[in-house]
Amino acid sequence: MSDQWKTKIVLVAVIAAALVLAAPVTAQEDPAEARPVDDIVAEDVVDDEAEARRPFAGEIVVTSTRRAEKLQEIPIAVSVVTSDELEDIAATDISVLQQYVPNVSIYQGRNQTSTLTAFIRGVGQSDPLWGVDPGVGLYIDDVYIARAQGALLDVYDVERVEVLRGPQGTLYGKNTIGGAIKYVPKPMSDTPEGRFSLGLGSFNTQEYRFNLSGPIVKGKLRGKIAAAKLLRDGYGENLYQSRDVSDKNTTAYRAGLEWLPSEKVSVQLNYDRTEDDAEPIGLTRLEANPFCLAFTGVACPPYPDLFDTESGIDPVNEIEATGYSLAVTWGISEALQFKSITAYRETDSRNWIDFDTTPLAIADSEATYYDDQTTQEFQLLYTGSDKWDGVFGLYYFDGTAGGRVEAIFFTNFPNTTEGYVETTSYAVYADANVHLTDKLTLNLGLRPTREKKHGVAFNVYNTDTTFTGYYFVAADFDDETTFTSWAPKIGLEYQFDPEVMGYVKVNQGFKSGGYNVRAQSTLFPETALPFDDEVMTVGEIGVKTVLFNRSLVLNAAAFYGDYTDIQVSTFTSYDSDGDGVDDAFFGNFLNAGDATIKGFELEYNWSSPSFFGLSGFLAYLDTDPDYLDEDGNEFVDTQVITNAPEWTGSIRANFDFPLFGGLLTASLGYSYRDESMLTNEGGADPRDPSGETPLEPLIQDSYGLLDAWVAWLSPKAHWRIGITGKNLTDEEYLTSGYNLPVLGVIQGSYGAPLTVIGTVEYRFW
């Protein structure tokens, strides 16, 4: 039996044993005494104002459905990671979610520390180029963030993060095919609160976070300000330039005002900004680049240190992301609430990538991106009838995303990709619950959408590396097209008893098509044509339970999805001189095929009546794609599904007990990820002149991460002192990479090594 399967069996066995053991431990407890240990300790040891203890999972209130509901009452596969959990694990950004949420992959995209790549249940988008919509919707202050740059949000001023799995079009303003990540900042109130924390650790980590909120005019005007400065030396070095790579240098801040002109009206203004000035991520050669030998007579093998690289271009990496939003809430009556959300966001970034990771100009690019978006959403929430309730909305999105990429291949083949894509979207959405009986509810939803895309591209081959003149136009088009969708939803939920709810539903989501801004339409005319919508239709059945005298929260969901016209960004090799050998490539974007996606998810959170608890998840994902083979050579032209490990899971042992008049909390956790495909190249391998060898994608083998933390919360909850260890076994694992053998480029980016961070936090008022 392989080590991979041994790990799976051990993980499943441990989870199963923990759940079985929960029954005899708690079954004879009196319900009044079977409270979570956090509540007992908080009442007996820590002052009632202590807000840092973990809440009982069955009582968590979320706003995933646009109304405040208990997590256990929502007929949706949704997970929540609270601010206290994020604080305990010393989370720097939201990429940590993949260790806490089933069937989720989140990592730094491309060459930048704050560019987001997110997949849920195998649905996402790894290409951050303009004109490409994400497969997973990201929201902050209920505002959709359309672009990947600057979207790997830093963890500060956060109340919780909610992750909804599966299409969510009937609940959210923008069409969301794979799922939604909702970042909920801390709310403003009339209770003053302030926090300051300092984190120091490995690689000269320095993390400063500050938050201050409270009344300006009590009962009428509230405000808050929050800031974070996150610094870390690089995990590796650019050996050619003697500079760090894969470091951290982020400045982020957020501010808000809330005006209460009456008991029924609230006006909230929010502002946020992120500045990323880190060095580029260290892209490491996984194989020797054969072209080094031709250029210099010396081979360029991989380096022993996984994070070291050797780049000859300027290490430029800058992102500035800014957002403004205005939310007006009006309680028209006890049954009816109206909300308006007006928002504007903009991002500017520069990122120079050395694909070949050598001092030579084999494959280098200089990219400048920009985007802006204006959104308007109107919501109407009705809760005034025993027969039905629902949320209804109108949504408008107007955005422009564009840029310029200057690339050099083999020193003397410079080219430029330049253009923009304008998106205008109108949508109506409705999500209603019809209460057929006291226990049975019918869920109905619909989302009509009309989305127009206007694509402009002017791609040329330049005469020299000044990129001012050109000798060949690869693409020159200005076109627009419109996409429409209805995205319906129907489901049933049944409340078996107050602590057990089951549901079944079928719903649909879509991601609109667009234009390939890297088109080479002069040679390949079809690349200038718009690619089609992705469509996902999912059937799901689930159960949410609170068992054993409210000591165990156990939720499960199984799903089956039909995924059509999957959009894939890939690099396509071709024969430029007619000698029968592929010696050039271009960036293509196409509908690569269909797939069937099915799986299940199990989440659990058990608290014993003493000091010990267990939490975690187990998830299975089976992706069965219909591969694209246009040339009929029996090789996959491009991989359809990436970032979709078959098995993922975690188990965490949690400890809470009184110490020195305060509360000591600790956790030891292990998270597992199965083998995962990282790139989607296909076709014949250009290194084999016979054309009989397929080009295999980059694959990360299965691996596990071991983490631990311990912290002490003082009486009155004013001080918190903690230490966190991440990747304690120093596991080596790839998160992304490039596979371009026609350029000798086989490289990747590795996840963080073993790190230890100590944190001191002071909470005043």
Image (cartoon, rainbow, N blue to C red):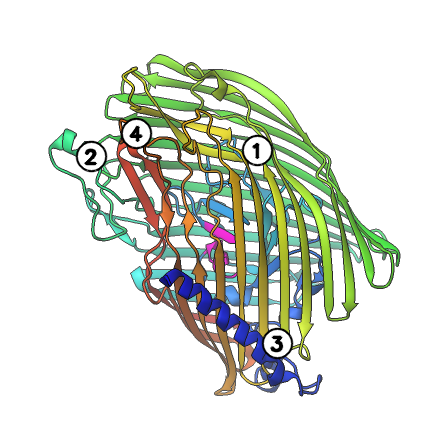
Cα–Cα span, label 4 and label 3: 65 Å
**Name of the residue lying farthest toward the left:** 297
**Could you tell me which secondary element the residue under label 4 belongs to?**
loop
Magenta stretch, residue numbers: 93-106
Name the quarter where the N terminus is drawn: bottom left
Q: Which of labels 2 and 4 is toward the front?
A: 4
Residue at (57, 52) in percent of width and height: 255
User: How much space separates mark 2 and mark 4, taking CA atoms?
Assistant: 13 Å
Residue at figure coordinates x 54%, y 72% from the top left: 16
Q: Which residue is tagged 2?
A: 290
Pair 4/3: label in front: 4
C-alpha span from label 2 to label 1: 36 Å
Quote the CA–CA distance across marks 1 and 4. Answer: 27 Å
Q: Amino acid at mark 2?
A: Pro
Q: Do residues under tags 1 and 3 come within 8 Å of each other at their CB atoms?
A: no
- Tag on residue 49? 3
Which of the 4 image quadrants contains residue 199?
Answer: bottom left
Q: Which residue is mark 1?
A: 565
Q: Where's residue 205, x and y in %?
A: 34, 61
Amino acid type assigned to the residue bearing label 1 in the image: Asp
Dot 3 lies on which element? loop
Between 208 and 144, which is closer to the camera in this rendering?
A: 144
The location of residue 389, given as percent across then percent down, is 82, 53
Q: Which residue is mark 4?
A: 686
- Cα gap from disc 2 to disc 3, whole angstroms: 64 Å
